[in-house]
Each structure stands twice: as C-alpha cells, then as structure tokens.
Image (cartoon, grey):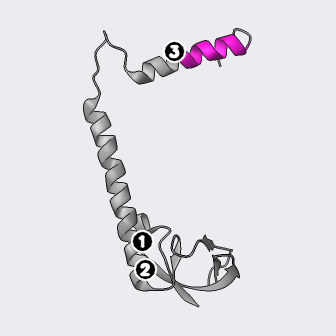
Amino acid sequence: MQVWITKYALSQGIFKSDVEDEGKGTVKEVACPFSLYYHGEGKEWHRTKESAIAKAEEMRREKIADLKKQIEKLEGMEFDDEKPNPSKKEKAHKKIYYEDFAGGRYI
C-alpha cells in the first residue's frame, strides 16, 4: 500500500512510500534495503495526502511555538556578575550533590 510519511516533515518534507502493514499501526518500507518502520497511523504515516498535510501543519505550529519560547528565554537572560543566572545555581547544586554522594570527589 502507499502512504504519506510525515516523521521527517520539518526537515525533509512529506514523502510518499510503498509500505507493508505490520499490524498495530506500524508499517515497514518496502523499497528500502534495510528495515525502516513508521509507527502510529496519523502520527508518522498517513493513508491520505490531506491527513499528512494537516499533521505537518500541526508539527510546524508546535515547532514555531517552541522556538518562540526559546527566543523569549534568551531575550530575558541577563549577564550580570552580581546576579547569578539559574544555570549557575543549578551547577552549584550539582557540585554539592556530587561531593556529598561521591565520597568527596567532584564528578
């Protein structure tokens, strides 16, 4: 059967592939010399082009939202020696944790 693959839609686009149904929502690519499996109808593979396009649009919206959150975090960072940023606090906490539980050695 032919299906549309969306697993790599944001990096390689949507592509059509000949597959064999392996059961439980899993398909295996036929033309591939090694086993390529796609899991979850409606997630990684689709029976219709329209369904694949809708999933790719959803993936794109989610990725854009994630990138916007990352940008907000980066824009909100301050590099002031007087105020440690959260990453410095986390590193200090990890150092104490490892010294306490690794016999005084910093790992």
> Where residue 67 sits in the image (x, y, percent)?
33, 49
Q: CA distance from mark 2 to mark 3?
A: 48 Å
Evaluate if marks 1 and 3 touch, with contact meaning CB atoms under 8 Å apart: no
Do we see residue 91 in this rendering? Answer: yes
Quarter holding residue 69: top left
Q: Residue type at mark 2?
A: Ser
Q: What residue is shown at x 53% (from left), y 76% (from top)?
A: 45
Identify the secondary structure beneath mark 1: helix
Identify the secondary structure beneath mark 2: helix
Q: List the residue tagged with mark 3.
A: 92
Q: What residue is shown at x 49% (from left), y 21% (from top)?
A: 90
| Neighbour tally class for label 2: few under 14, some 14-19, many 20 plus, Cα within 10 Å | some
Boundaries of the magenta span? 93-102
Residue 33 on the magenta segment:
no
Q: Residue type at mark 3?
A: Ala
- Seen from the viewer's position, the closer of residues 86 and 34 is 86
> Where residue 39 sits in the image (x, y, percent)?
61, 70
Q: Quadrant of the N terminus?
A: bottom right
Identify the secondary structure beneath mark 3: helix
Q: Is residue 87 above or below residue 8?
A: above
Q: Residue type at mark 1?
A: Lys
Q: Quadrant of the C terminus?
A: top right
Q: Residue furthest left?
A: 75
Residue 58 placement, left or right of 47: left
Q: List the residue tagged with mark 1.
A: 55
Evaluate if marks 1 and 2 touch, with contact meaning CB atoms under 8 Å apart: yes
> Where residue 16 sits in the image (x, y, percent)?
48, 83
Q: CA distance from mark 1 to mark 3?
A: 42 Å
Q: Earlier in the sequence, mark 1 or mark 3?
A: 1
Q: What residue is shown at x 70% (from left), y 8% (from top)?
A: 104
Q: List the residue tagged with mark 2.
A: 51
Front label number (2 vs 3): 2
